[in-house]
Image: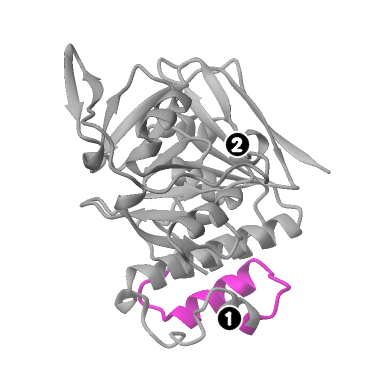
Amino acid sequence: MTSYKLNYETVKSNILPPISLHLHDSHTTAIYSDTDMQAELIDTILRNGDITIFDRKDGLYERLSVGDNVTFYHKWFGCTIPLPEILVMFELQTCTKKPLRKCTHFELARVYYARYFMTNTYPKVFQEPIQGVDIKTINIFLNMLQKLTENKTPTLILVSNMEHALLLSDVAYRLQDKGLLKIEVDAEVMEKDTDEEPAPALSTAKLFKVPAKIEDKVILFDPTEIDYIESQDGKAMIVVNHESFSLDSTLTEIEKTLEVYGFYRCHRSYIVNLQKVREIITWSKNTYSLRIDNQAKSTIPLARTKIQGIQDMFNLK
């Protein structure tokens, strides 16, 4: 196993803390942070090495067709994979003659993916690679990541969405003022014994409000208002239509309280209101997400070890 080391421990920055991280060729790594921290990290990477950041912003020829773009870069980078195989891999074979300027946003993203895949850069670093694309395009990107791992290419994903970090990577970190903090995955600690009693059915409970803080105020939420609850830095955060509110309770404590109201621990870092689940998404990487029925159409991770439990609750086969 080989690796590539990102070492920015001596970089002076008012925003970015010292960073040292090994990118291994056996898995994909993600760094989740806010947009300001991400921008500073990208600037640091570009100033301190010869790494290219793939951000879907430039590098294509708009006057050329999809096929001409892919063909040009296939020759330019000396890609050894046959061109027809590249077109099929990124599902571009049906739009090869379409001018780039007439492509949909999703088709354009897949042309970028094809170009990035064929480059000889090492390691590969992607910024927000699946932001704003459809499920089909996300699955194509996941397949590409699998190919990169098979090719022993260290890969880093930079995102400002935790669900994307968990979906796209094998190892994910949260970048904070104090440095990188590894995000633990559900499979390591969350599973209960298989002979445990089944999860309780949804039922009516006594009047109850969930207290949350915003600045110096305490807001009381009815459980039915809550979309989901996520863990951030060890603290539970209520999410209501993409707005977050801090709780004094830990995720484990609030899980026990809200279980009777139809909430389910779908991931180590998430508790979901089952009444708000609109869709169960299956990705090609054998990973899952839940789409929430709110204005933001949020998606949150569903651990592989939790898929059976949620199927049982919805009587799915």
Going 67% across and 46% down the picture, which residue do you hit? 194
Query: For residue 248, which quarter of the picture?
Result: top left
Please state the extent of the stretch shown in magenta in the rendering: 61-84
Task: Please state which amino acid type lies under the numbered disc 2.
Answer: Met
* Above-or-below relation of 151 to 252: below
Residue at the far right in the pictured view: 1
Looking at the picture, tell me which residue is in the foreground, 280 or 52: 280
Q: Residues within 10 Å of mark 2 (few under 14, many from 20)?
A: some
- As measured in the structure, the alpha-carbon distance from the residue carrying label 2 to the one carrying label 1 is 39 Å
Q: In what quadrant of the picture does the N terminus appear? A: top right
Looking at the picture, tell me which residue is in the foreground, 68 or 186: 186
Q: State the image coordinates of residue 21 (x, y, percent, origin top left).
A: 65, 29
Going 46% across and 85% down the picture, which residue do you hit? 96
Q: Mark 1 points at which residue?
A: 88
Going 75% across and 59% down the picture, which residue do you hit? 150
Q: State the image coordinates of residue 315 (x, y, percent, origin top left).
A: 46, 64
